[in-house]
Image: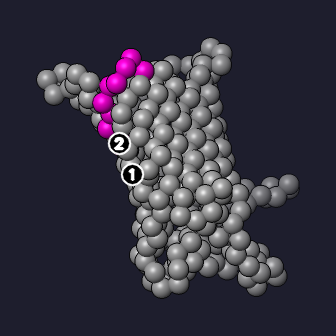
Amino acid sequence: MIYSTNTAFAQIDTAKNWTIKGENTFLINQSSFTNWAAGGVNSFAGNVVLNYDFNYKKDKWSWDNKVLAAYGQTFQKETDWRKNDDRFALNSLLGYQLTDKWLYTFFTNFNTQFAKGYKYDESGNGELTSSGFSPAYLSFGPGMAYKESDNFKINLSPASARFVFVTNPDIDETLYGLDAGAKSRFEFGASLDAYYKKDIMENVAFENILRLYSNYLENPQNVDIDYTANLFMKVNKFITVNAGVQLIYDDNTKIPTFENGVKAGEDPKLQVKQVVGAGITYKF
């Protein structure tokens, strides 16, 4: 059984030049098997996603802000409760119009999570690898943006500062590129943020989000990559189907590996997350 609710709203304050949009999603997924010859595992999952935009526009000035918070848990008898989603992100872009499509900008990005995360071996034993603000990423810097429309925009910052924080003393900070015993790491480099969304056919839209970062201070040729692709399919006025994949590669992030229940090493690897969901949408 899958049950999903998705509410969206938009509010415009013309007196203060603010536009506020929001979307709340709640998903429950439950599977149960009794005397089922083919076998199966009873499971239950619940996810909450809050996605809000707070945008300001007056004369040549603009200030776009997005807040995303997501958390989910899944339960299976063999593994008990485990996280299946945990995100908090704040993205802000201050812009001053230079020409019709070009802006001077200053961006700020902050990313972290809410709860503890574990890497599990083949036997189901977990090693603590993350928690709230461990890690946390803060990036900011001046730049320029090209904005064709709300569906196609690119921001480039050639002088971007980035801090990586690991505040939990129980987390191995070296997994995230920090020196042993350190609580933060400073990087300085270039960042690129690109967004492109296109209607590929009626009621089907394809969204692309790309973030690149090169650290001038250490191995600038090793570019950090964060790419997300989302496919939105509108079945009717109320029902939608979404599918997405996120690919992350960070040369400084080490992923523990296990062999026969024993840690075999820690190496940078391509991180992949896939999501498929069906929901009921209600707009007001």
Residue 161 is situated, as x and y percent measured from the top left of the image, at 42, 57
Residue drawn at x 48%, y 21% is 148
Q: Do the CB atoms of the residues marked 1 and 2 lie less than 8 Å apart?
A: yes
For disc 1, the marked residue is: 140
Is the stretch drawn in magenta largely helix, strand or loop?
A: strand
- Residue 71 x/y as whole percent: 48, 55
Q: Is residue 99 magenta?
A: yes
Q: Residue at x 74, y 74 (%)?
A: 257
Report the residue that reaches farthest toward the top.
202
Image check: 106 left or right of 217? left
Give the residue pinned by disc 2.
Answer: 106
Quadrant of the rendered image containing residue 99: top left
| Highlighted range, magenta | 92-101
Q: What is the CA distance from the residue labelled 1 to the residue labelled 2?
A: 7 Å
Which sits earlier in the primary sequence, circle 1 or circle 2? 2
Q: Nearer the viewer, residue 5 or 215?
A: 215
